[in-house]
Image: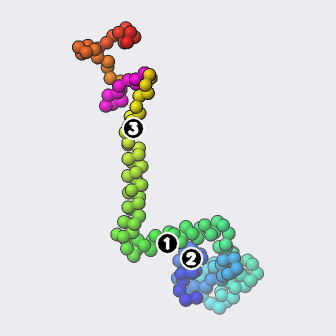
Amino acid sequence: MDGNEYINGLIMGEVEMPFIIVLNMTIDGYCLPESKIETIEDLLRFLNSVLDGSAKLLGGNGFLQHTKRVFNKARSTVVSMFQAAPFFSCFVFGLPVGIVALVIWRTCTAVPADDEKPVEGAAASPALDAHGRKTKEMQPDGIEKTSEAKKED
């Protein structure tokens, strides 16, 4: 084959050229030699093990293998983006992450607004201070009411 792009995607790794691999294109399976092939006898031993089925068949086109390939392709694309243009890649990934983080932060730290208007005839809700506690009921002259006076109101 010319180049190793297809093989790298198939085995989800890197192969150094030249390399010997046996492909089963119908099921996207492949067999790798267990040891380095240095002689013709090593090559014949490897090919015979593939023919008699003793070589381990890797890969395949099942759902799990396909999912692994999709994630591997995404990972290799992101890695190549960062290698080619690191500042642009930081912007491309950092901007959406920053916006989502800001939205989550603002949602979690938002102070609820009391926009409800009181219904006529309903008892008014007690007034709250800045810390969310009930304010003390004061008489016009500034003296706090006693519990008995509160009951009378």
Residue 76 image position (x, y, % from top left)? 49, 72
Which residue carries the number 3 mark? 112
Whether pointer 3 and pointer 2 mark residues with C-beta atoms closer than 8 Å, the reply is no
Q: Going 58% across and 70% down the picture, which residue do you hit?
A: 69
Whether pointer 2 and pointer 1 mark residues with C-beta atoms closer than 8 Å, the reply is yes
Q: Is residue 52 left or right of residue 65?
A: right
Query: Is 78 situated above or below 25?
Result: above
Residue 130 image position (x, y, % from top left)? 31, 31
Which residue carries the number 1 mark? 76
Query: Is 9 situated above or below 118?
Result: below
Question: In what quadrant of the picture does the C terminus appear?
Answer: top left
Which residue carries the number 2 mark? 9
Q: Going 72% across and 81% down the picture, which residue do you hit?
A: 49
Residue 112 occupies which quadrant of the picture? top left
Residue 133 image position (x, y, % from top left)? 35, 26
Q: Residues within 10 Å of mark 1 (few under 14, many from 20)?
A: some
Q: Residues within 10 Å of mark 3 (few under 14, many from 20)?
A: few
Q: Going 58% across and 88% down the picture, which residue do you hit?
A: 1
- Which amino acid type is shown beneath numbered disc 2? Gly
The alpha-carbon separation of the residues under discs 3 and 2 comes to 51 Å
- The magenta span reads 123-133
Magenta stretch, main secondary structure, is: loop
Q: Going 55% across and 78% down the picture, which residue do you hit?
A: 8
Name the N-terminal-most of marks 3 and 2: 2
**SS class, disc 2:** helix
Residue 32 image position (x, y, % from top left)? 63, 79
The residue most toward the front is: 120
**129 or 120: nearer the viewer:** 120
The residue most toward the bottom is: 40
Observer able to see residue 76: yes
